[in-house]
Amino acid sequence: MEQKYSVEVEDLGIQISTGTIAKQANGSVTISMGETNLLVNVTAAGALKDGQDFFPLTVDYRETYSAAGRFPGGYFKREGRPNEKEILTSRLCDRPLRPLFPKGFMNEVQVIGLLLSADMVNDPDILMVNGASAALLISDIPWNGPIGGIRLGEIDGEFVVNPTHEQMLDSTLDLIYVGNEKEMMMIEGSAEQCPEERFIEALEFAQVQIQKIIAAQRKLAELCGKQKKEFPLIICPDEILNMCTEYVGGRLLTAVFQDNKLKRQGDVDALMQETAEYVKTKVGEENFDMAHIKMAFEVLQEKVYRDNILDNGARCDGRGVEDLRKISCATNLLPRVHGTALFSRGETQALVMTTLGTSRDYQELDGLTGGTKQKSFFLHYNFPPYSVGETGRFGSPGRREIGHGNLAERSLLPVLPSEDEFPYAIRLVSEIMESNGSTSMASVCGGCLSLMDAGVPIETPVAGISCGLVTRFDENGNLLKHVVLTDIIGAEDHFGDMDFKICGTKNGITGFQLDLKIQGLSMEIAKEAIYRNKATREKILGIMQECIAKPNEELKDCAPRIKVMQIDPEKIGALIGPGGKNIRRIVEVSGAQIDVDDENPGRVLIYATGAESMKRAVFEVELVTGEIEVGKTYRGIVRSIKEFGAFVECLPGKEGLVHISELADFRVNKTEDVCKLGDEMFVKCIGIDDKGRVKLSRRAALCEQRGEPYEPKSK
């Protein structure tokens, strides 16, 4: 008989249930908040694959349109490849789960989340993290959880836990916080230049709030948790490790301690191959396993890197623990590109290009979980294999590219001008030229420089840097010593314990992301890293300012120009014309793009790539929507002939009378002696009476052309 188990999270409106569906998975839960409901299943493979030497953890989150009662858009009426939201949610969940699996556990594990119901109010990404933790906790898979996660906003100076999409529009903070019962595990998000002190308050507040979620998971595990299975742990045999240690001796230290990444990798690989041949002769070919040699070298390298940092304060490239690598910046590098920058930090280099577009380049978002429906700022990050001196897959972006691009994008977004001030679509493309640590932070710095080069009036410059960590614990898990590292390279990320990226301005934090390889980070170490990052960020901002002090005041010649015109809302119909005929004609004759702002009545945006194109478009719009003004000269068309003069249409549908006495600078006996129907003539408006009747003069226009004074004739 089926048995359903369910728990409520105190004060947060979250319910976690299990026991009714997906019962063949190792662990399965449904988790809901409001009417947003998510199913999360976890499964572990019973055996290892041949030659497996890594832990294959896969976390996948998927949304189905049926969850919102909708059909998928497009020709094929089923879901396709995961969208950006699904990928980012999968990565968000993966990062805090991974460090909590036992070291040496290598059985494949899959965590799959499926959105069952979407109320368009509550975001399911937080539910995915908590559901995965609950499913792993009650399963028989070895895992050192639970963890709890919340989204924290700040509205009118008050923290709000798990704000709705509508509330997030007013929030100055978007913090996703994941932790265990004592320490933080992962943070991610953005802020509107949040001061470091307030940011720390938010972290401390969030750590308290997640305890309610962890307590509910503990209660569920007490009700229905399975006994954990015994899985074989794959570690290097002591005999092989000792043999490698003895043979390598101090040569690994020499190979590791040099400031060229490729040379370092090459020397370590050569030493590993030499050691493998030695071990093979000792144990015999039939007992030799290259995977053991690779595991041994991971252990040996980790010890070399970590011990020298902890005991001697020495890093492999010769820097001190607080030292930045050499930084260089350059802008205005490429023709025909609206903005460019090259940012280099040590062996990490990003070429970032800015493109300015029109409102037609905005992206319509077809998400299922609420939030904004239109996007006008993009940062796309590309990581080609040549950036690390390798061959490999080169094509559509993977999860890493999407995640790094999103981090850089949200870090720059808070300083961009409003669309009212700068109504362009903005796209940044960060092409990684070299990689040895923190390419996403190079993309932020290069992206900021590129925006300034393009003439985007950002509020203030943004820079980003990553801090690392090396720790030492005793056999009881008590922290003995730690060292926070400034500006980590790839090897320090791999063999270290933390990658804490923070971006911001001189005023505060705009973007952040924390990843750990240990099972928690204390608040004290987090504070140290936050303030270290602030001091380093200010140095980088100073270097960037030497390259370009403020945004260029003029756009590049090849960039589109924009003019915002405010016309009488009642004349929008005349501008568009029947079936759009008139606005299409203006676009055709001017070569400009004309957009009517539906949200702001009477607001018209004109985009053009040349001065003549802009001038013609503005002229044509004014022709359609303007009023005849006293003192202005018009090229009009004779629409009616009378004995006393001619009626001339100056603007579409707008005409005035040229009295026979104002047709020429000589006496005119008959109107037909000067003009006939359909003739074009230049006329000047010389008055508008109190009844709105327009008085025109061809004679005044002729005087203006000759540079002579015009004298009105007395009646």
Image (cartoon, rainbow, N blue to C red):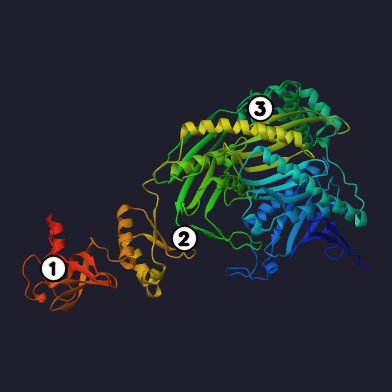
Secondary structure beneath label 2: helix
Secondary structure beneath label 1: helix
Query: Could you say which disc has been placed on residue 360 in the image?
Result: 2
Give the residue at x 47% y 60%: 360
2 and 1 marks in contact (CB < 8 Å): no
Q: Amino acid at mark 3?
A: Asp
Of mark 2 and mark 3, the one earlier in the sequence is 3
Which one is nearer the viewer's eye here, 179 or 144? 179
2 and 3 marks in contact (CB < 8 Å): no
Q: Amino acid at mark 1?
A: Glu
**In this view of the protein, can residue 48 be seen by the observer?**
no
Give the percent coordinates (x, y) of residue 183.
79, 40
Query: Could you say which disc has been placed on residue 267 in the image?
Result: 3
Q: CA distance from mark 2 to mark 3?
A: 53 Å
Bin the neighbour count of mark 3 within 10 Å (Cα to Cα): few under 14, some 14-19, many 20 and up.
some
Which one is nearer the viewer's eye here, 284 or 585? 585
Secondary structure beneath label 3: helix
Query: Is residue 259 rendered to the left or right of residue 617?
Result: right
Give the percent coordinates (x, y) of residue 391.
59, 42
Q: CA distance from mark 1 to mark 3?
A: 94 Å
Q: Residue 685 falls in which quadrant of the image?
A: bottom left
Q: Amino acid at mark 2?
A: Arg
Give the percent coordinates (x, y) of residue 42.
81, 55
Q: Which residue is mark 1?
A: 662
Of mark 1 and mark 3, the one earlier in the sequence is 3
**In this view of the protein, can residue 225 be seen by the observer?**
yes
